[in-house]
Image (cartoon, helix red, strand yellow):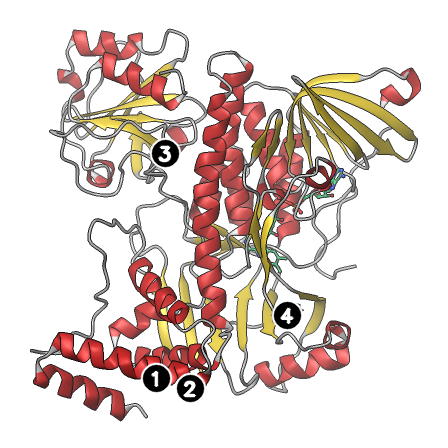
Amino acid sequence: MALNLNPNFSEAGKRYFNAYSPGDDFYEMLIGTHRDLSDEQSELLNARLILLLANHIGDIDTLRQALTLAREGI
Amino acid sequence: MLKTYNYPQFEYRTPPEIASGQTLKVPVVVVGAGPVGLAAALDLQLQGVPVLVLDEDDTVSIGSRGVCYAKRALEILDRYGVGDAVCSKGVSWNVGRTFFREQEVYNFNLVPDPDYHRPGMVNLQQYYLEEYMAAAAASRPDIELRWKNKVAAVAQSGKTVTLEVETGDGFYSVETDWLIAADGARSPIRRMLGLEIEGKVFMDRFLIADVLMKADFPAERWFWFDPPFHPGQSVLLHKQTDSVFRIDFQLGWDADPEEAKKPENVVPRIKAMLGDEREFELEWVSVYTFQCRRMGSFNHGRVLFAGDAAHQVSPFGARGANSGLQDADNLGWKLKLVIDGKAPAALLDSYTEERVFAADENLMNSTRSTDFITPKSKVSRTFRNAVLGLAKDHAFGRALVNSGRLSVPAFLTASSLNTPDCAQDIFAGRMLPGAPMDDAPVLDKGDDAWLLDKVGHRFFVLYFADDPNALDGTTIAALSNLSSGGIAVQPLVISRQPGTVKGDIPHLEDLRGVAAGRYDAKHGTVYLLRPDQHVAARWRTFDAARVRAAVARATCNL
Ligand SMILES: Cc1cc2nc3c(=O)[nH]c(=O)nc-3n(C[C@H](O)[C@H](O)[C@H](O)COP(=O)(O)OP(=O)(O)OC[C@H]3O[C@@H](n4cnc5c(N)ncnc54)[C@H](O)[C@@H]3O)c2cc1C
């Protein structure tokens, strides 16, 4: 499956009046999840999160595209 | 003293109560003649309520504060008769650009759709806004402005609020039925009544400079993350009126504000940004920290809080004055109905309900922006920079870039004043109950006009028709009947085709169908509109009894 690079966040049953709101909802949760962690703990959290999400996506081809794009920007 | 602006000095007159020793009795007092207090006074004046405004100062906002006034605020200012002055003096803009280090990563256009009267944003120094509002207020016979009148004490008992007012000539007392506290972020009224406001200070400092220069930068908002001329921090550039540019430099918490403000420290920062050869003069420099906080309730008995007194946000998103004007917009008609005995005092609880909802949305959005702009931890900064890096190439990244989510009105969809849609009435679009009305170009007796200029101040029932000539006598009579009774509802027909409506119901033509499109209207669709231009209810077919019931609900009379 082609990696979706367009805005793609939404929550069932929630109506948005501004295009930025669902992405901002996610971003706040993401940063909030790291609250009060040490840098080392945050790194571990990120690793766990990537593994969880990667397994959910499952499709190795999609993951390969994401891994490639992520690496290209470094 | 500024080079481009002379602060007006409003006349102080000795209050007659000082010599007479009498207590002044008035129905409504507004404390504070900032943008929000003046808006409250202008709104109540439109409602036919006389207002006394007290302000401890005798001029407008000093220095550089509010800059950006959003479409909804401009529409409210139109109701107060100052929209044209603000828009013609101000700098209209819609496009914002965001840069990360050297590159532009993102831009937005606030109003991609052209058929609106007002632009997405107008930039204007706050002192001009206040000057125009004060002039409008001074011209209205029902508004008495008392400058250099400082409220020194306040007490509330039963149905009366008592004030002690201090002037250069001595003290006098005022008794009033209702007090609107628009006395700013430090709100002495709030303090004197022992009320709390909760929230937090952002651990950051911003240097704000108004710079006078000849520059042909386009009228756009430019925001830099980590630019080469101010590494590690953010910078914001806005064009204001009179060739004055406003620059906000993030300094960090450890900066010494007194040192940062000195011209010998400010000028090099600006030179680094603009290049050495550009000539400029400093109009104003200050250093700010920001708070995010709000009161638990905005109405306390007979005292109603509005604007910064009730809630404060960080400036990313320009939500301070913009939301304060919406407080006044929300409050005026409700207070009028309560004063007239046409609605119970519970209607004022809906002022708190709706404006707390809006304040929380403003606080949430400005807090999110602040957290993105000034990350509080290493991981937060890493994510921020990753987003900015991805934004250049990927649309999803651009949507996450948060350099300020600019003020938009809250959709009061959860308000207890709304009548929910009937199950069988299916509507598309965003004009659902609780929505702030979308504007649309219309024709009024053949002349170009705007829908929002034709509604407001009182309840309206907007009847959408295809052919106005075909409207039958029964419908016309039922619509006309709504304008009598306890709470009058003004009927207004808006038709897709040209023609005339029998009888004397006002009529607009929507020949291009912009209004019908925005309101997803078909022949016979009806909207009930609140005095503050919010949708209260809507139906696919007109039934006067349902309109009456929705008015009752919107006024807590159910
Ligand atoms: C750097 C900065 C940038 C900003 N940018 C924006 C922006 O772009 N857009 C936007 O919408 N908002 C912006 N704001 C916020 C905006 O300036 C405020 O939200 C707005 O001024 C609030 O208006 P107000 O009428 O509630 O209070 P104020 O403007 O503070 O007015 C309060 C009034 O009450 C009077 N007063 C106080 N105590 C007493 C007393 N005891 N007796 C009598 N009178 C009294 C004062 O003299 C004053 O006139 C910005 C603020 C800052 C600091």
Q: Nearer the viewer, mark 4 or mark 2?
A: 2
Determine the CA span between mark 3 and mark 1: 43 Å
- Whole-percent x and y of residue A52? 21, 77
Helix, strand or loop at label 3? It is loop
Chain letter of mark 3 equals B
In the picture provided, is B364 more to the left or to the right than B471? right
Q: Are marks 2 and 1 on the same chain?
A: yes
Helix, strand or loop at label 1? It is helix
- Quarter holding residue B233: bottom right
Q: How many marks?
A: 4
- Quarter holding residue B394: bottom left
Q: Which quadrant is the C terminus of chain B positioned in?
A: top left
Query: Which residue is the site of mark 4?
Result: B205
- Whole-percent x and y of residue B370? 50, 66
Determine the CA span between mark 3 and mark 2: 45 Å
Query: Which residue is the site of mark 3?
Result: B415
- Whole-percent x and y of residue B164? 81, 28
